[in-house]
Image: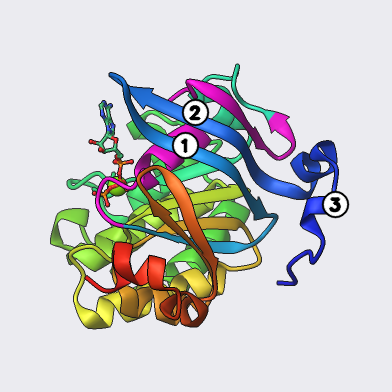
């Protein structure tokens, strides 16, 4: 990923078009409290961007804005060059924004395969027809994704018997199936074992380059493994940006977050 060296010389319109996600003077106020107050933030197409910051920094609010769940109080946000301020979350989802919430949204009583079948973008099928609608191409696609996340051997396991990590990967797999342009992943390592955390990082690294991925995470070991460009948020603002090792040298960042 090469950073554009002279970003400040680029006109606003070019910025909107060169980023998958671009926010400008983006403010969200909840009951008089500024939860988000971003002067400028851009995430490139097919970049893997990590967002860190202390509790209440506005990270989830940022994802809510990008996915259309929370409107900006003022300012602008563009996704794929399109101003999403007037679009609803359904339209935005239609633009290819996929989102994984902290609690995985999988159906416990269904098997891994059945969950994937239901997540197929075309197959909003009624249950008795579950097996009829699926094409060979779709089957292949499901198999490929499940292999990538290490769930190929669990295809006929009911989701309730999966580990927390496996459920997270299933939820991610269901998202990937829809081939989102932009994946928003909020705290994927929360509650995972060290090994599961490691595997989740590997999974995101494998997906890197195929989608634009924004990952929010507290786990510094996980962030280190992702080895990607990091945005540090604090009190609704972008406090600093850079590689993790650069940010470690930044006193302000250390004070607000890393030094905790
Ligand atoms: N719907 C809401 N109504 C009122 N205040 C809210 C709402 N959503 C978030 N906030 C407040 O906005 C601030 C930012 O919250 P946000 O959830 O974005 O933080 P975060 O960086 O994701 O924190 P965490 O690391 O704990 O998940 C917090 O002070 C929170 O209490
Ligand atoms: Mg949050």
Q: Mark 2 — residue?
A: 68
Can I make out residue 216 in this image?
A: yes
Q: Is residue 73 magenta?
A: yes
Q: What residue is pinned by disc 3? A: 9
Q: Are marks 2 and 3 in contact (CB under 8 Å)?
A: no
Residue 132 among those drawn in magenta: no
Pointer 2 with pointer 1, Cβ within 8 A: no
**Measuring 79% from the left and 49% from the top, which residue is drawn there?**
18
Q: Quadrant of the C terminus?
A: bottom left
The x, y position of residue 135, in whole percent, is 58, 48
Q: Where residue 185 appears, x then y in whole percent?
A: 41, 53
Provide the secondary structure element on which disc 1 rests. strand
Residue plotted at (21% across, 55% down) = 159
Q: Give the range drawn in magenta.
A: 54-82
Q: Give coordinates of residue 188: x percent, y percent.
A: 32, 61
Judge by depth and name the residue closer to the eye, 62 or 195.
62
Q: Quadrant of residue 11?
A: top right
Q: Point out the residue furthest to the left here.
A: 161
| Marking on residue 37 | 1
Q: Which mark is residue 207?
A: none
Sequence-earlier tag: 2 or 1:
1
Q: Of callouts 2 and 3, which one flags the residue occurring earlier in the amino acid sequence?
A: 3
Residue labelled 2 has its Cβ within 8 Å of some atom of ligand 1: no
Numbered disc 3: secondary structure: helix
Question: Helix or strand or loop: what does disc 2 sit on?
Answer: loop
Q: Is residue 54 above or below residue 117?
A: below
Q: Which residue is drawn at 40% across and 42% down?
A: 236
Q: How crowded is mark 3: few (under 14 residues within 10 Å), some or many (20 or more)?
A: few
Left or right, 110 with reference to 19: left
Q: How crowded is mark 1: few (under 14 residues within 10 Å), some or many (20 or more)?
A: many
**Is residue 136 positioned above or below 90 on the image?**
below
Q: Which of marks 2 and 1 is in front?
A: 1
């Amino acid at each position: 990923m090469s950073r554009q060296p002279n970003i400040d010389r680029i006109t606003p319109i070019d910025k909107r078009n060169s980023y998958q996600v671009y926010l400008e003077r983006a403010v969200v106020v909840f009951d008089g409290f500024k939860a988000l107050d971003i002067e400028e933030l851009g995430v490139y197409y097919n970049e893997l961007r990590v967002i860190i910051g202390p509790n209440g920094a506005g990270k989830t609010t940022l994802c809510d804005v990008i996915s259309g769940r929370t409107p900006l109080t003022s300012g602008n946000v563009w996704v794929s060059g399109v101003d999403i301020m007037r679009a609803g979350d359904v339209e935005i989802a239609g633009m290819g924004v996929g989102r994984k919430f902290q609690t995985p949204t999988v159906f416990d009583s269904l098997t891994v395969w059945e969950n994937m079948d239901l997540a197929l973008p075309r197959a909003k099928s009624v249950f008795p027809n579950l097996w009829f609608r699926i094409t060979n191409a779709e089957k292949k696609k499901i198999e490929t994704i499940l292999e990538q996340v290490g769930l190929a051997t669990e295809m006929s396991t009911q989701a309730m018997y999966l580990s927390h990590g496996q459920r997270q990967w299933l939820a991610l797999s269901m998202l990937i199936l829809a081939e989102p342009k932009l994946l928003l992943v909020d705290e994927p390592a929360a509650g995972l074992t060290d090994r599961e955390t490691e595997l989740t990082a590997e999974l995101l690294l494998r997906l890197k380059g195929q989608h634009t991925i924004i990952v929010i995470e507290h786990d510094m070991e996980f962030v280190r493994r992702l080895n990607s460009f990091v945005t540090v948020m604090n009190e609704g603002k972008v406090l600093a940006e850079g590689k993790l090792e650069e940010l470690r040298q930044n006193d302000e960042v250390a004070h607000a977050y890393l030094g905790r």
